[in-house]
Image (spheres, helix red, strand yellow):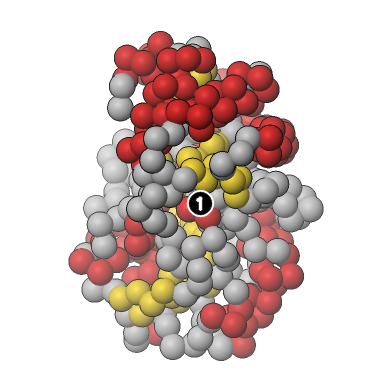
Amino acid sequence: MDTDLKASCEYDLSFPFHQPQTATEKLASIHAFMEQQQLITEYLISGPMVEHLEEKVAALFGKPAAMWCPTGTMAQAIAARIYAGQSGTNRLLLHPTSHLLLHEHDGYQQAHALNASLVGQWRQPITAELLDGNAACAFVELPQRHSGNLLPSWNELTALKQKANQVNLPLHMDGARVWSSQTYYKNRTFAEIANGFNSIYVSLYKDIGAIGGAVLIGEQAFMAEARLWRARLGGLLIEPWPMIADALRLLDIRLEQMPGFVARAQQLAGLLVQINGIQVDPQPPHTNLFHVLLPCSSEAAEKARDAAAQATGVWLAKRFWAYEGEHQCAMEITVGEKAAAIPDDEFFNAIKIMVASIKP
């Protein structure tokens, strides 16, 4: 990646997706928030500040308990280990796009001795008929990031929950980006969306923009065991309070902004129907994230992105996902504060020039 070219661009739509702050500015914002809220340093993930965050997130999702974790990878591994121990089987049901399969170097298998059965198609959600009761649990990502943040319809989601209940299969929600799902579900609450799931994980850095952290949510007994696993896996950080304070600082702000981000994603995606040779998926976007499917390798896409950046001053994306074929890849567009602010013509021209620059 040409970091100098990226730095020279007037508009940068890559991660982080909100208006950037220097390290000094970020720490100053956290300090000001803690002073305003009269929060103090806490050690080993204990104290009123982390309890407030856990209680707040648990209430949002209609569950009695929650636990802050340093990473989502750890939070989801903990959920899988608990369900495997309860069921006596090490088999997980995973969609082919699952984070466990694509981004964790087979940690579920190498570190936790779990096995995966893949269910579903790449650009389709997991549906009820794919579930069976011979697994420890099913991981359901809402929304599916590598399917363009695809969501099942409300009827499909309801049927999925009903089938899992019928076959006594625990459902775990990979809700890393669930914060953007309410618009698609006609502004149903997070508790309504989560009802029927046995546990939920949410990220605090992706759409929320905090400096790190995740929350695992579930029933009291489940969360009590989760706290044991967090300690076993080395998750008891000495001073995690900057991450926790930053999440508290930003959570309500981002949830208020999110409907606007989703609407802006739909506007930007709508502009691209005028450009031949590409496909937006889903169209219209279900959330604040969508994919632009390109007929080339990821290497060719990177070169075309650079050509567009040089011509327009717009940096469109950091990387391109090439999981679906040798000569096709997906450019991921996520709308946060930065993408929400880009003028229509600047975005459209950058995409148009990029597509014209593709040399498969």
Q: Amino acid at mark 1?
A: Arg
- Screen quadrant of the N terminus: top left
Q: Residue at x 68, y 77 (%)?
A: 159
Q: Is residue 59 visible?
A: no
Percent position of residue 320, x then y = 40, 41
Q: Nearer the viewer, residue 318 or 348?
A: 348
Percent position of residue 345, x then y = 66, 19
Q: Residue at x 57, y 66 (%)?
A: 125
Name the residue beneath numbered marker 1: 145
| Residue 254, picture quadrant | top right
Percent position of residue 148, x then y = 55, 50
Side (left or right) of 270 relative to 249 = right
In the displayed orientation, state which residue is furthest to the left: 110
Side (left or right) of 120 relative to 154 = left
Q: Nearer the viewer, residue 37 or 351?
A: 351
1 relative to 237, above or below: above
